[in-house]
């Protein structure tokens, strides 16, 4: 079995292979214009804020859906400017509120 080569795609759509990444890393380490203590930061989308008091992690619930329900939920969520998780959270909060 042949090992699959990993590739990444930059924000501008350029594909970077493992060989490219290794070459760039070597170039970065050799570059005298870069301070020795330089750090590379990879930006990522900020996570949703915790729903519980500061310093603690919100509990999570995981459940399965059919592909059709997931697709419909994504459309409804997009229409309402939220995520599928946000949509599910709102629906569960509403159900619990009305069941109390």
Image (spheres, rainbow, N blue to C red):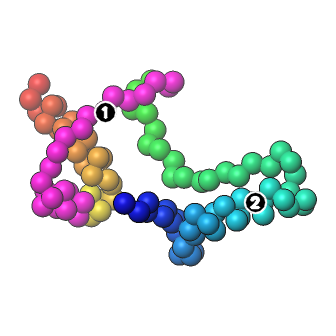
Q: How many callouts does the rendering have?
A: 2
Query: What residue appears at the point 24 percent right and 60 percent down from the top-left corner?
Result: 74
Query: What residue appears at the point 27 percent right and 52 percent down from the top-left corner?
Result: 84
Tell me if residue 68 is in the magenta stretch: yes
Vertical side of 91 occupied by 15: above or below: below
Q: Dot 2, how many residues are within 10 Å of its Cα: few (below 14), some (14-19), or many (20+)?
A: few
Q: Magenta segment, which residues?
A: 54-75
Circle 1 is placed at which residue position?
A: 60
Using the rendered image of the protein, determine whether residue 22 is visible from the camera's viewpoint.
Answer: yes
Vertical side of 5 occupied by 93: above or below: above
Query: What residue appears at the point 12 percent right and 54 percent down from the top-left corner?
Result: 66
Please tell me the numbered disc located at residue 68: none
Q: Position of residue 44 (x, y in %)?
A: 54, 52
Residue closer to the observer: 33 or 6: 6
**Going by the image, does 65 lie left or right of 87?**
left
Q: Position of residue 34 (x, y in %)?
A: 86, 57
State yes or no: discs 1 and 2 in contact (Cβ < 8 Å). no
Vertical side of 10 occupied by 25: above or below: above
- Quadrant of image for the C terminus: top left
Secondary structure at badge 2 equals: helix
Q: Dot 1, how many residues are within 10 Å of its Cα: few (below 14), some (14-19), or many (20+)?
A: few
Q: Residue furthest right?
A: 32
Tell me if residue 60 is in the magenta stretch: yes
**Going by the image, does 64 lie left or right of 4?**
left
- Gap between marks 1 and 2, in whole Å? 41 Å
Secondary structure at badge 1 equals: loop
Please tell me the numbered disc located at residue 26: 2
Q: Looking at the image, is mark 1 or mark 2 earlier in the sequence?
A: 2
Q: Residue furthest left?
A: 99
């Amino acid at each position: 079995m042949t090992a699959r080569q990993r590739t990444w795609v930059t924000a501008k759509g350029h594909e970077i292979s493992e060989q490219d990444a290794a070459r760039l890393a070597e170039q970065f380490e050799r570059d005298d214009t870069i301070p020795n203590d330089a750090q590379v930061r990879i930006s990522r989308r900020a996570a949703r804020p915790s729903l519980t008091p500061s310093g603690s992690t919100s509990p999570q619930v995981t459940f399965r859906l059919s592909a059709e329900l997931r697709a419909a939920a994504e459309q409804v969520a997009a229409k309402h400017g939220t995520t599928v998780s946000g949509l599910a959270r709102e629906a569960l909060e509403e159900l619990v509120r009305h069941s109390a």
